[in-house]
Image (cartoon, rainbow, N blue to C red):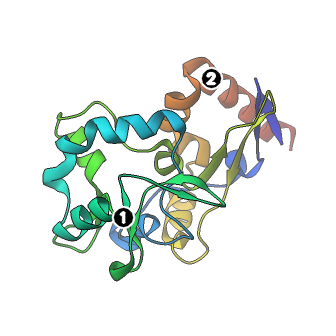
Amino acid sequence: MIAVDNVLISNDVVEEQFVCDLSKCKGGCCEEGDAGAPLENAELDLIVDLYDKVLPYLTPESIAEIERKGKYVYHREFGWVTPTLGNDNEICVYGYRDSKGTIKCAFEQAYNDGIIGWKKPISCHFFPIIQKTGREGDFDRMNYEPREVLCKPACGLGKKLKVPVYQFLKEPIIRKYGEDFYEALDTAAKLYKSSK
């Protein structure tokens, strides 16, 4: 483990290489899993506040499911999560398939179109890092957990391009922890690699 501030970072985050290959995985992380996307408490109000603005990006099935279940739901193991559509391989209700069958995020598309200022849940932005916030002063944790089959193309592309996981995920790391944290992680990663 590498420790930066109050965060414990798995060595895999700096050792392994990864670059999403959407043309191959088709955004499968938006539907493969045991529940919807985990949400931080602060994100619950954001989802409610931004819902009307992302409504045009949602499918009729998603809208019906949100009206039935709510904009987020509680899962015993994962806490607050986005609802999923049972009739579409458990896809997140905020996801939709484009003309090529790739799953896109309604929040991210609205963000890219300049309609909202929030990109998507931080847990989605971090994937394949699973980030857990520590409780009551405990350390946060960052672990690299790609899906064995789904993420195989991304692992291959990362190796081909020689991009470490933490560099590929620079934007969400800075979004969550700030520029200084990322610079400290980058320095620690370089020291770690040079010591091996």
Q: Residue at x 20, y 73 (%)?
A: 100
Q: What element carries label 1?
A: helix
Counting residues from the start of the chain, the first of labels 2 and 1 encountered is: 1
Which of the 4 image quarters holds residue 51?
Answer: top left
| Residue sitting at the far right | 195
Q: Of the numbered discs in the image, which one, if any, rests on residue 183?
A: 2
Q: Label 1 sits on what residue type?
A: Leu
- The spot of residue 25 in percent (x, y) is 41, 71
Q: Is residue 164 visible?
A: no
Nearer to us in this view, 8 or 15: 8
| Residue 196 shown left or right of residue 109 in the figure | right
Q: Does 153 sit above or below residue 163?
A: below
Q: Residue at x 23, y 66 (%)?
A: 64
User: What residue does disc 1 label?
Assistant: 22
Q: Is residue 144 visible?
A: yes
Which of the 4 image quarters holds residue 63?
Answer: bottom left
Q: Residue at x 42, y 64 (%)?
A: 30
Q: Does 19 sit above or below residue 172?
A: below
